[in-house]
Amino acid sequence: MGVKQRFAYCASKGAVLAMTRQLAVDYPKELRVNAIAPGTVQSPFVEGYLEKYHAHEKDKVREQLVARQPIGRLGTPQDVASLVRYLCSDEAEFVQGAVISIDGGWTAA
């Protein structure tokens, strides 16, 4: 999805989507290729962002990040790890060329 004033970021995400699909088509028997598109996850990256750009109002901005999530919370590394574990399992052997959002419903809203 487009994000205001994030041209390079959005273009790179579009490239990930295209490369995922192309690799899945080119190597369907050799590789299982999927992409995970995480939303805002409680992580050192998010904390660094808050510190760098919002040091004087980190709690307020963190609350805004949470408020935009339909599920009502930020993601956790465990949320993403669970999806990775599934995609690496035999249960997901028919999942190929997918881009899976794990963002608490943010892109669905």
Image: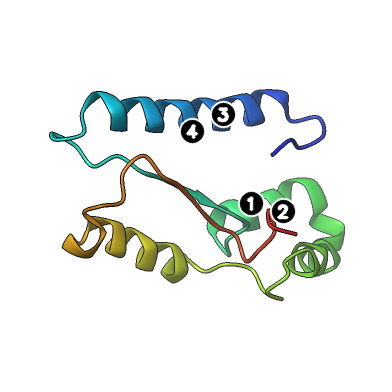
User: Which residue is depicted at the point 64% across and 68% down?
Assistant: 74
Circle 4/circle 3 CB separation < 8 Å: yes
Residue type at mark 1: give it. Answer: Gly
Closer to the camera: disc 2 or disc 3? Answer: 3
Residue type at mark 2: give it. Answer: Glu
- Say the numbered circle drawn on residue 17: 4
Circle 2/circle 4 CB separation < 8 Å: no
Residue on which the image places disc 1: 48
Residue on which the image places disc 2: 51
Residue closer to the observer: 7 or 1: 1
Circle 2/circle 1 CB separation < 8 Å: yes
Circle 4/circle 1 CB separation < 8 Å: no
Residue on which the image places disc 3: 14
Circle 1/circle 3 CB separation < 8 Å: no
Q: Residues within 10 Å of mark 2 (few under 14, many from 20)?
A: few
Element carrying mark 2? helix
Closer to the camera: disc 1 or disc 3? Answer: 3
- Say the numbered circle drawn on residue 19: none
Quadrant including the C terminus? bottom right
Mark 1 or mark 3, earlier in chain: 3
Q: CA distance from mark 2 to mark 4?
A: 30 Å
Q: CA distance from mark 4 to mark 3?
A: 5 Å
Q: Position of residue 69 (x, y in %)?
A: 72, 66
Residue closer to the observer: 23 or 8: 23
User: Which residue is depicted at the point 25% across and 23% down?
Assistant: 26
Mark 4 or mark 1, earlier in chain: 4
Closer to the camera: disc 4 or disc 1? Answer: 4
Residue type at mark 4: give it. Answer: Leu
